[in-house]
Amino acid sequence: MIKINPTGEKFYEKYSWVIFFIIGLIILAGALPHTFGVNTDPALVQSISGQTLDELKNSRPTFFNLYHYYFRGGGLSDLGFAFFLIVISVTAYRQKQKWSWFAFLFVPVYFLSWIFLSSTLPPESVSSLFPPLIIITVLSLFGLILPLKKFFPKQT
């Protein structure tokens, strides 16, 4: 008789690492354009500043340079964040090393913080920010909850 699953691991426990891998890929996809200074949501800048990027660049070049510096720096930070999510998910989290579960607790906290921070923006800005932030927060919570029994087995 052939056993399909010799370890007795449930599918969602075995492959929960994929959730964080996908989150890492999503962050990576958003980080690359930002790192190179490409603003993928110029309407957001306009709703916050009241000016388009070109108007901001022409009217206040020093302020635009500061914005551009932090924007690209944020892209670099996101690249690093995505790198660690991807590497930890395919190694330690996949192997059910307990420290990686605790490290990934940071992910929903991080994105909940972004939701809270974004709630202070004008309402028209929130509509483009909230959906992806909420989706990633929910996905990361699933990624933590689904394999909970594997990371923290009951003591006998």
Image (tube, rainbow, N blue to C red):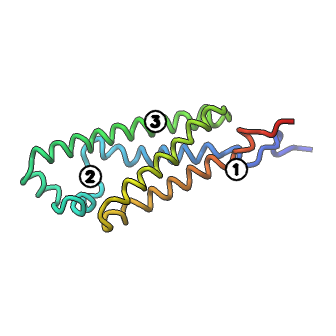
Q: Earlier in the sequence, mark 2 or mark 1?
A: 1
Label 2 packing within 10 angstroms: few (<14), some (14-19), many (20+):
some
Cα–Cα span, label 3 and label 2:
21 Å
| Secondary element at image label 3 | helix
- As drawn, the residue found furthest toward the left would be 59
Check whether the beta carbons of the residues at disc 1 and disc 3 lie within 8 A of each other.
Answer: no
Q: Position of residue 137 (x, y in %)?
A: 52, 53
Q: Where, by quadrant of the figure, is residue 119 drawn? A: bottom left
Q: Amino acid at mark 3?
A: Phe
What whole-number distance in Å separates the C-alpha atoms at marks 2 and 1? 36 Å
60 sits to left or right of 95: left
The outermost residue toward the right is 1
Contact flag, marks 3 and 2 (Cβ < 8 Å): no
Which mark, by number, is residue 12? 1
Q: From the viewer's perspective, is residue 92 above or below residue 3?
A: above
Residue 66: image location, x then y, percent: 18, 42
Q: Is residue 150 left or right of residue 60?
A: right
Q: Residue 73: which quarter of the image?
A: top left
Secondary structure of residue under mark 1: helix
Residue at 59% over, 45% down: 18
Residue type (three-letter) at the residue carrying disc 1: Tyr
Q: Quadrant of the N terminus?
A: top right
- Which SS class for mark 2? loop
Figure check: 16 above or below 125: above
The disc labelled 2 sits on which kind of residue?
Answer: Asn
User: Mark 3 — residue?
Assistant: 83
Q: Which mark is residue 39?
A: 2
Identified at 21% across, 61% down, the residue is 46
Tell which circle, 3 or 2, labels the residue nearer the N-terminal end: 2
